[in-house]
Image (cartoon, grey):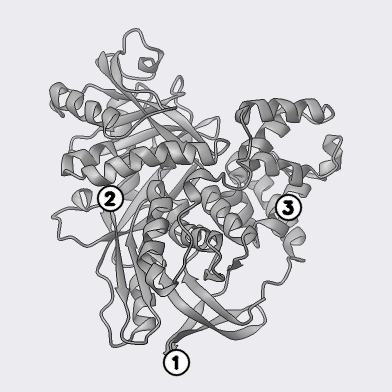
Amino acid sequence: MLDGVYDLAIVGGGINGAGVAADASGRGLKVVLFEKADLASGTSSASSKLIHGGLRYLEHWEFRLVREALAEREVLLERAPHLIRPLRFVIPDAPGMRPRVLMRLGLFLYDHLAKRRRIPGSGSVDLTRDPMGRPLKPEFRAGFSYYDCWVDDARLVVLAALDAAERGATILTRTPVTHLARRGGLWEVTAQTASGMRTIAARALVNAAGPWCSEVARLASPAGQAPALRLVRGSHIVVPRLSGADDAYLLQNTDGRVVFALPFEQIFTLIGTTEVTAPSPEDGAKPSAEEETYLLAAAGRFFSRALTREDIAWRFAGVRPLVEDGAANASAVSRDYRFDLIYGDGEAPLLNVVGGKITTYRCLAEAAMERLAPFFPGLPPPWTATQPLPGGNFGANGFSAYRQSLERRHPGLAPATLSRLASLYGTRAELVLGGALHENDLGAALGGGLTEREVIYLRDHEWARTAEDVLWRRTKAGLHMADAEQARAEAAIASLLATAPSQA
């Protein structure tokens, strides 16, 4: 319910907005978050699914960003080990690309810019002997290996929002903000809720709208200057798993960019990303034919198996709202974040959040609260670095031990079912299972491992309101369904979601 005066109103339900909401709520502030669509429905579900330091950012001398991101890999791995895992990468040595001495130097820095506890270091690879060489063309005989982490990006956003909600925040999805105005030292925020137009008051406003940041800034201050963004579309394609490609590859392309080929959803390979200027946020929702050709060609240069457009099982794209720094090309634009704090004498503050990357969302949230701290005297100190995300509280024995105990405690359920639920929900898998003793207790199987019980959980606990929310963001079950099966699942999910609880 919307009531009273909030300390903090946040516009934007991507990773930055959800992260700020969690941080602020954990410090005792009364928080409301408005998202015009679904959580992670924009950029935050269209990443390369990596928690990474950004090896290539070293070429642009972004040592502070890389150091922060490298350290944050360890923090996030500790907070959500069911959702985040170390992933080995191989960089095939490609003639005419970056010199080997430069690669060695970059990887040495990557290993030593931040302390590593659970993530291994880099090394040289003989691709004629290492299994990682098998999917590659025979001319690629040597290379390097290093480690970063894989993440389910959309689920990470949901966990941050859950963290905020469990600490008292109000999370409103499908609630577009229509009007913003300062009144008497407060912000008035008007939004279109399910029950009609509602207006709340807040002592501070955070604009974390991502690609729509400039639009929200203009709504808040029609006569003011909106943040300058460089909108860059990043596209990805998903193909059947390249045989033997069970780890990840960083491929050096002929234009100087790099392309990732990542193991995805057990039986697929994810290939991306591109960097193409997007005229507007709406232009970022779908890869172009040229981008698909680019990604297929990059993979074709390295892998033995030739891929065609007919191999593409799924494609997605998102717009990165980068800080406009005047760089000549999109690859050189900084992935760092920036804040614009705007207020006058006696005015409620507006904090515009510009840029950022999913790896450093928690650091961004801490930094945002540091900028807002003068407006909230006595604000408690940062806390998120040492607290697990919802479902990540596995204790000293860790995720693997929990998954094994789940199987022992539910012998009537298939190990594959329990493993899938544990990987998606961590210890919250118990909420999905309820008192289920057998597979039939989970309700009808909808395809892709999804059951009616899981959909109901997502409806009641994770703000799922449409079949797309369930099939492509809360899970990737849609990727594992044939077209006819997906159509039946969509109809069944729509029926189950029809009784979703009211938000406002």
Question: What residue do we see at 25% from left, 61% from top?
Answer: 323
Front position in the image: 269 or 426:
426
Percent x, y of residue 456 = 75, 54
Q: CA distance from mark 3 to mark 2?
A: 37 Å
Percent x, y of residue 94 = 20, 24
Residue wearing tag 1 = 184
Front position in the image: 277 or 340:
340
Task: Residue 457: give its label.
Answer: 3
Circle 2 packing at 10 Å, graded few (<14), some (14-19), many (20+), is some
Task: Residue 275: give its label.
Answer: 2
Q: Amino acid at mark 3?
A: Tyr
Position of 451 with respect to 35 (left or right) is right
Q: CA distance from mark 2 to mark 1?
A: 44 Å
Position of 88 with respect to 98 (left or right) is right
Is label 2 in a helix, a strand or a loop? loop
Seen in the picture, residue 258 relative to 390 is either above or below; the reply is above
N-terminal of the pair, mark 2 or mark 1, is 1
Q: Are marks 2 and 1 in contact (CB under 8 Å)?
A: no
Mark nearest the camera among 3 and 2 is: 3
Is label 3 in a helix, a strand or a loop? helix
Q: Is residue 447 visible?
A: no
Q: Is residue 59 visible?
A: yes
Percent x, y of residue 9 = 50, 74
Q: CA distance from mark 3 to mark 1?
A: 42 Å
